[in-house]
Image (spheres, grey):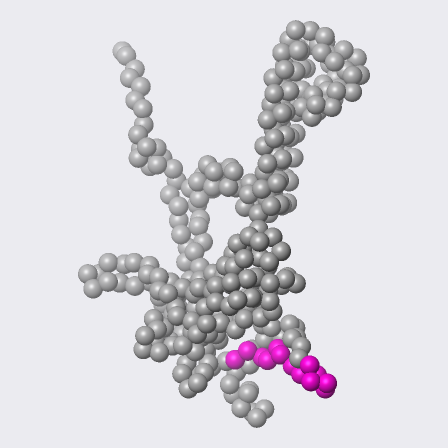
Amino acid sequence: MKLRLTRLSRKQKQRLIPRIHIKIQNGLFEIMGMGAWYSYWRDPYHLLLTIPWAGFVLIICTFYLTINILFALAYWVGGDCIANAQPGSFLDVFFFSVQTLASIGYGAMYPKTTYANIIVTIEAMIGLMGIAVMTGLAFARFSRPTARVMFSRVVVIIPHEGVPTLMFRTANQRRNMILEAQMRVYLMRDEVTAEGQFMRRIYDLKLLRNQTPSFTLTWSVMHVINEHSPLYGMTPESLTQTNALLIISVSGIDETVAQVVHARHTYGANDILWNSRFVDIIHHTLDGHRYIDYNHFHDVQTLDEVGDRD
């Protein structure tokens, strides 16, 4: 009886990957299932650039200890092959591996057999490549331009110039300017076409002002809800039923590093407050100057509360 080996095609391999489940809550997508992690670990470079610094350091330390343990086992299996190392001591060969991998070379311990020299040669090559890769990853993470833009926790819909208007606030958290800043707002919701086909459709929301020459302090972003707006005629219930999601994208040139920076934020249907307005954060002093109070940046009040005060 002969065994026949068949090579799986790309589609067949993809079928072996666990399915990725998507959970939608408040318009936000949550990817669930082992298939998501399988896809994530297939791109280790992107993983090491995007995970938080704590996770990055943890992965590097784990990789570093694992490599040294493996080479320490290789030296330990070779017997008394390291000069000035206590025979049978795993701790001695482990620290010898650390010195070799980092190209330290104190000289107190050194290989004394051909077997040990071969292992040292292999470890030295891996150490050189590892240092180059880790240095490149650390530099890429440090040199990547980022923006520190704060978004209000909620979006409000209030009358503006007699027309319902969607509004949210942003602020530049750095003491510099984002030059030629551009703001884009997208509405994503579930729809069913005339043919009965389900689709997740994206609309561009037209803003009263979608760019500014210098984004320094705050920016109040407004979208007029008229008959040309995809939000026209929608209610809080319809936003929830269609899993509506607002996607905010900000881009501009950082004045300090002269590179393009980006910031992104999302709002679900539950983050949209109707008939409410933001609390004023711009105030005047007695001597005629103006100042911004960021303590009330996220605070809102209903129109009824505003009317009672008036």
Q: Is residue 60 shown above or below 293?
A: above
* Residue at horizontal 58 percent and vertical 32 percent from the top: 133
Image quarter hosting the C terminus:
bottom right
* Residue at horizontal 48 percent and vertical 69 percent from the top: 271
Q: Position of residue 139 (x, y in %)?
A: 61, 40
Residue 288 in magenta stretch: yes
Q: Is residue 122 at least partly visible in the picture?
A: yes
The residue closer to the viewer here, 297 or 40, is 297
Q: Residue furthest top?
A: 114
Q: Which residues are magenta?
A: 277-289
Image quarter hosting the N terminus:
top left
Quadrant of res 68: top right
In this rendering, would 230 be left or right of 279? left
Quadrant of res 118: top right
Residue 4 in magenta stretch: no
Q: Is residue 303 shown above or below 76?
A: below
Q: Position of residue 236 (x, y in %)?
A: 40, 74
